[in-house]
Amino acid sequence: VSCNSKQTTEQNSEEKILTIKHNEYKGECIGYCDTDLIFDTTNVLYIKRGWDSNSKQLPEIDTSFQISDSLWNNLISIINIDKIMSLDSLYRTDDSGSWVSEGTITFEIITTRKQKKITFVNRKYLQPLDSLNKKLIEFRREL
């Protein structure tokens, strides 16, 4: 068993995070209510989608800029790949102590070996993603 544990640890240490995607959809609303942050090792793409009062789609807005190594390293330091890959793909609850007030938040991580997408609906609080989600929501508000 210890040999297998060591082998798993060595394999996981070689796994690298390539992309972090974070979507925040605020449900039915007027204006830009659907946003994406897409991080890779050097850049972030910020995309906003929305609708007007006549349910007509507004022009998509996207902005791309470079990120520092320290920001990228800070983001990936929060992520425990093994724990995230073991999570379910959908979480739904009504927990008033959480960070999703309405709509959904979707988190996706792409590594050199795997991909995982997790959607949170209706106020879900969940470790180990809570710290990362809070950080990404805070980052989005600063844009």
Image (tube, rainbow, N blue to C red):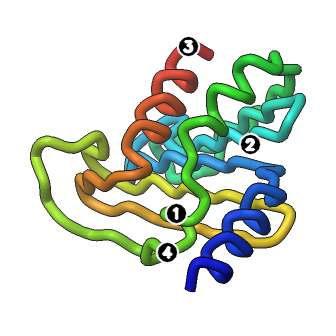
CB of mark 4 within 8 Å of CB of mark 3?
no
Q: Quadrant of residue 82?
A: bottom right
Q: Secondary structure at mark 4?
A: helix
Q: Are marks 3 and 1 in contact (CB under 8 Å)?
A: no
Location of residue 43 by image quarter: top right
Among the two numbered marks 3 and 1 on one chain, the one whose residue lies closer to the N terminus: 1
* Mark 3 vs 2: CB contact within 8 A: no
Question: Does 136 sit left or right of 94 as displayed?
Answer: right
User: Which one is closest to the eye, mark 4 or mark 3?
Assistant: 4
Q: Position of residue 45 (x, y in %)?
A: 79, 35
Amino acid identity at mark 1? Ile
Distance Cα–Cα, label 4 vs label 1: 5 Å
Asked which secondary structure carries label 1, the reply is helix
Amino acid beneath label 4: Ser
Pointer 2 or 4: first along the chain: 2
| Structural crowding at the residue carrying mark 2, measured as other residues with C-alpha within 10 Å and reported as few (<14), some (14–19) or many (≥20) | some
Looking at numbered disc 2 in the image, what kind of residue is underneath it?
Answer: Ile
Q: Which residue is mark 4?
A: 86
N-term mark: 2 or 1: 2
- Judged by depth in the image, the label closer to the viewer, 3 or 1, is 1
Q: Is residue 127 rendered to the left or right of residue 22?
A: left
**Mark number for residue 84?**
1
Q: Which residue is mark 3?
A: 142
**Residue 35: x, y in percent?**
59, 41
* Residue that mark 2 sits on: 38
Instruction: Report, in whole angstroms, how far the alpha carbon at label 3 lies from the one at label 1.
Output: 26 Å
